[in-house]
């Protein structure tokens, strides 16, 4: 005998795809909530599995993933729960283990001045104005999101779905080879909250697309 169960629950196919498949043009889409970790065109079960497949290292307890080649303009997205206000990186894109904290780096971080902000250093020169961050410290335990576009003289970021903030005078660092998760390469800025998703997108997203990623 067969038993049929009727449900009024409506499934949103777009939401299912968004949670379980990678974002379009993403070369890295690490979804810690659904435990689906896309690296290039391959699905893994964890960041450790990505690294074990020869795509990075975890020397010194810091997880580093080799960064696939990116175009001259690219984008990224992160969702996390912040910790106690401090200088802490949810992710950084760096030039490898050169021991220089502020050399060539792109990062998303908490600070003593903001809940979340985007930073860019090229040749150890800070390229970002104080505009590319959220205002005020707030409290720990807050869910924060950021979607950013990296393009020469056209940096842009949307935080928590708010209107895009821009920086129109900026260089981009060269030689970015590594994604560092929840820290920077020297291990000095550990993220004290939790990370829900990190996505590196090999495409230049529009302002509207940056806002939409946060919704």
Image (cartoon, rainbow, N blue to C red):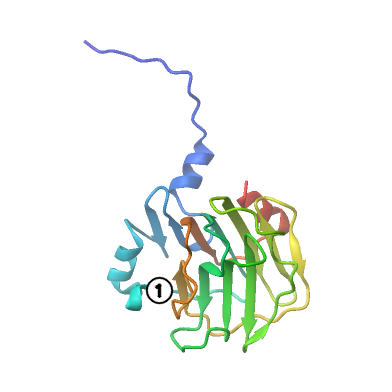
Q: Is residue 111 left or right of residue 200?
A: right
Label 1 SS: strand
The answer to whether one can see residue 57 in this image is: no
Please name whichever residue, 131 or 56, is drawn nearer the observer in this view of the structure. Answer: 131
Q: Residue furthest left?
A: 1
The residue under the point 77% across, 78% down is 169
Please name whichever residue, 180 or 155, is drawn nearer the observer in this view of the structure. Answer: 180
The residue under the point 58% across, 75% down is 106
Q: Quadrant of the N terminus?
A: top left
Query: Total marks drawn?
Result: 1
Q: Is residue 209 left or right of residue 167?
A: left
The residue under the point 74% across, 74% down is 129
Q: Tell me where residue 95 appears, x and y as whole percent.
A: 50, 83
The residue under the point 40% across, 47% down is 34
Which picture quadrant has residue 110? bottom right
Q: Is residue 93 above or below residue 11?
A: below
Q: Is residue 173 above or below residue 116?
A: below
């Amino acid at each position: 005998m067969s038993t049929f169960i009727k449900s009024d629950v409506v499934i949103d196919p777009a939401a299912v795809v968004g949670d379980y498949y990678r974002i379009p043009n993403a070369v890295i889409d690490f979804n810690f909530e659904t435990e689906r970790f896309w690296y290039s065109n391959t699905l893994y079960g964890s960041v450790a599995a990505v690294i074990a497949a020869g795509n990075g290292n975890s020397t010194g307890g810091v997880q580093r993933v080799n960064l696939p080649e990116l175009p001259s303009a690219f984008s990224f997205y992160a969702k996390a729960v912040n910790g106690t206000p401090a200088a802490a990186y949810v992710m950084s894109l760096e030039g490898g283990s050169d021991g220089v904290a502020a050399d060539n780096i792109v990062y998303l971080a908490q600070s003593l001045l903001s809940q979340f902000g985007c930073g860019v250093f090229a040749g150890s020169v800070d390229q970002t104005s104080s505009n590319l961050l959220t205002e005020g410290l707030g409290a720990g335990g807050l869910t924060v999101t950021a979607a950013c576009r990296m393009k020469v003289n056209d940096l842009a970021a949307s935080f928590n779905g708010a209107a895009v903030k821009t920086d129109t005078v900026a260089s981009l660092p060269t030689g970015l080879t590594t994604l560092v998760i929840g820290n920077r390469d020297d291990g000095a800025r550990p993220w004290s909250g939790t990370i829900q998703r990190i996505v590196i997108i090999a495409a230049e997203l529009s302002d509207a697309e940056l806002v939409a990623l946060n919704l």
